């Protein structure tokens, strides 16, 4: 049996195509490997292994002095507080923006089938504002805000408020537009105000979806507020940054454990809220 | 206790007789809402945000000055080429990180979907949960020790976190597949690996594809900010220029970030359309 025979008899009829596709993909990936300096073998050279080993060997036992644990507890609460306060402010910003951006609440569109020029202009403007708010990553907002309001939790709260008002505003508008609009439209047609149409027409139809999305975002905000500590916005992230700079492996491992527990708790609470209120 | 019950009955009665304008709210929900309100007020109280300092004329003036420093963005050719280089680096980080995560996520998803037994399932799910609950940026800070400053640490950080996310999603997808096709192949004498590749994978592939694209969109956002802790890409450039107070350069970098994110969102939308048909 020659080599070409084995090729012919391969049980998968399209195997040549598959292999070619993989080779082409690898060829396309090659420049990317070069650009991102992807050199896994460097992880295994003696110097890198030594540094890693030295750092990791400090992980056990985790730091557990009373003093340090109290410090971490306070920092953890600060992280939760930054996320909660930030999300509350984001809601205050997102709700009016949602009302402006939602198309089904437009009175002028309903009458003529077309929105008035002025109102559609405002609606477009609000949409662009929402896009801008949520496209700039929260960490970049935090980095900029730290320079305006100084180091500390205020920058973190404001960064979350800005990013999340953009996200909430967009998704709230989408939820309101995609839910059953019949009640809203009837209310508007019969002369109810926009606020009344929202409260008695749109909200009852989509309140559970709105609440569960908000709970999910709260969970994300907690993760976000941890990360923002690394640019000086307070909380457990800032503590970790300090411990990393001192290469204190035992402190880092305590913080990581607390962090995994915090995320698991936030996950559970947000799941419970979604079930209870949703 | 008794009086509460009577009230509840009265409410229910009223509701049956005429459409009430007030919804019936159970005591548990009221307790939950009170809990939420106290969480929010405790957050604002302990953070002690100095609102009075934020809303002074001077604060507004310095914020304005800061923002005006961004205009006009730096557009000189050498600088634009540097930005293009870093943009390419960021893009490569996100693509490679996602690809590595797909491979390792799938490798962990197979035990996590319970194919090798319950113990293996529990263990790999725990591992995936830990990988997932530590954000990319925190991974990057830790991996900087092993991989050194630069894009490689960032790529690894993306890969590690995304492995956790994709592994869990893949495992859930594998568990929910119908078992018929695989069982048929096995009964007819196919080896387990062949049965997996020719019966399980083709069924799960569209779902895997759409999860992967969703994570890629996420990873490009993460890749732009990872540099802030020194893990390469546009974030590193932003941090550098901001720390030198070169606002016009920083503005260009932020614009490049937004363009890159928008571009990847577009590409991912197109790919999703092509590959999964929805």
Image (cartoon, rainbow, N blue to C red):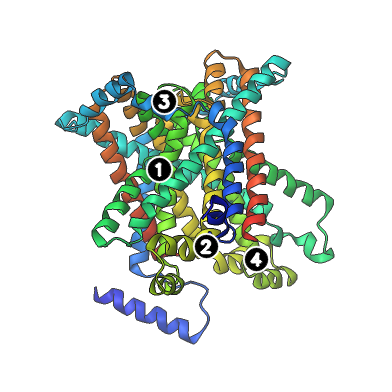
The chain holding disc 1 is A
Q: Quadrant of the N terminus of chain B?
A: bottom left
Q: Earlier in the sequence, mark 1 or mark 4?
A: 4
Q: Earlier in the sequence, mark 4 or mark 2?
A: 2
Residue at 59%, 64% in the rendered image: A199
Give the Cα separation between the discs numbered 4 and 3: 44 Å
Residue B100, image x, y percentages? 46, 41
Image side of residue B110 versus residue B246, left or right: left
The chain holding disc 3 is A
Residue A191, above or below A150: below
- Numbered disc 3: secondary structure: loop
Q: Are marks 4 and 3 on the same chain?
A: yes
The local crowd at label 2, few if under 14, some if 14 to 19, many if 20 or more residues have their Cα within 10 Å, is: few
Q: Mark 1–mark 3 contact, CB under 8 Å?
A: no
For disc 3, the marked residue is A232
Nearer to us: label 4 or label 2: 2
**Image-quadrant location for residue A274:** bottom left
Q: Mark 1–mark 4 contact, CB under 8 Å?
A: no
Give the Cα separation between the discs numbered 1 and 3: 16 Å
Image side of residue B250 versus residue A186, left or right: left
Residue B5, image x, y percentages? 30, 77
Give the Cα separation between the discs numbered 4 and 2: 64 Å
The chain holding disc 4 is A
- Nearer to me, A237 or B236: B236
Nearer to us: label 4 or label 3: 3
Residue B50 visible? The answer is no
For disc 2, the marked residue is A11
Residue A157, image x, y percentages? 46, 36
Residue at 57%, 46% in the rendered image: A22
């Amino acid at each position: 049996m020659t080599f070409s025979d084995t090729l012919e008899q391969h049980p998968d009829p399209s195997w040549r195509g598959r292999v070619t596709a993989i080779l082409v993909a690898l060829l396309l990936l090659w420049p990317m490997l070069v650009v991102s300096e992807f050199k896994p073998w460097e992880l295994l050279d003696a110097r890198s292994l030594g540094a890693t080993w030295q750092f990791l060997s400090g992980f056990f036992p985790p730091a557990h002095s009373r003093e340090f644990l109290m410090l971490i507890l306070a920092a953890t609460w600060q992280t939760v507080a930054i996320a909660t306060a930030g999300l509350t402010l984001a809601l205050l910003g997102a709700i009016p923006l949602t009302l402006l951006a939602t198309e089904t609440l437009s009175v002028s569109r309903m009458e003529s089938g077309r929105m008035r020029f002025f109102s559609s202009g405002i609606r477009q403007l609000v949409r662009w504002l929402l896009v801008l708010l949520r496209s700039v990553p929260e960490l970049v907002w935090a980095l900029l805000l730290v320079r305006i309001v100084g180091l500390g939790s205020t920058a973190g709260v404001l960064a979350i408020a800005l990013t999340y008002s953009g996200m909430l505003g967009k998704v709230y508008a989408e939820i309101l537009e995609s839910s059953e609009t019949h009640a809203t439209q009837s209310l508007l047609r019969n002369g109810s105000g926009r606020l009344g149409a929202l409260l008695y027409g749109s909200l009852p139809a989509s309140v559970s979806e709105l609440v569960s999305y908000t709970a999910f975002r709260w969970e994300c905000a907690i993760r976000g507020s941890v990360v923002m500590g690394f640019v000086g916005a307070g909380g457990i992230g800032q503590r970790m940054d300090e411990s990393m700079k001192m290469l204190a492996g035992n402190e880092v491992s305590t913080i990581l454990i607390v962090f995994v527990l915090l995320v698991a708790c936030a996950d559970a609470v947000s799941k419970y809220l979604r079930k209870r209120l949703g | 206790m008794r009086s509460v019950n009577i009230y509840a009955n009265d409410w229910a009665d009223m509701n049956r007789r005429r459409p009430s304008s007030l919804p019936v709210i159970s005591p548990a929900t009221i307790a939950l809402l009170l809990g939420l309100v106290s969480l929010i007020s405790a957050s604002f109280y302990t953070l002690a945000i100095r609102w009075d300092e934020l809303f002074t004329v001077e604060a507004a003036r310095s914020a304005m000055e800061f923002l005006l420093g961004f205009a006009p963005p730096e557009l000189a050719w050498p600088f634009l080429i540097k930005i293009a280089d870093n943009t390419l680096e960021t893009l490569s980080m996100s693509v490679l990180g996602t690809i590595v995560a797909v491979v390792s996520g799938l490798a962990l998803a197979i035990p996590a979907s319970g194919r090798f037994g319950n113990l293996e399932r529990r263990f790999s799910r725990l591992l995936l949960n830990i990988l997932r609950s530590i954000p990319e940026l925190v991974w990057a800070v830790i991996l900087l020790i092993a991989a050194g400053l630069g894009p490689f640490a960032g790529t690894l950080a993306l890969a590690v976190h995304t492995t956790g996310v994709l592994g869990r999603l893949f495992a859930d997808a594998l568990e929910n597949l119908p078992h018929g096709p695989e069982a048929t192949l096995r009964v007819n004498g196919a080896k387990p690996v062949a049965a997996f590749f020719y019966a399980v994978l083709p069924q799960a592939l569209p779902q895997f594809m759409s999860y992967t694209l969703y994570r890629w969109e996420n990873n490009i956002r993460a890749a732009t900010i990872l540099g802030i802790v020194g893990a390469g890409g546009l974030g590193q450039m932003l941090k550098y220029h901001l720390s030198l107070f070169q606002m016009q350069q920083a503005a260009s970098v932020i614009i490049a970030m937004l363009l890159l994110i928008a571009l990847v969102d577009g590409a991912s939308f197109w790919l999703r359309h092509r590959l999964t048909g929805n």
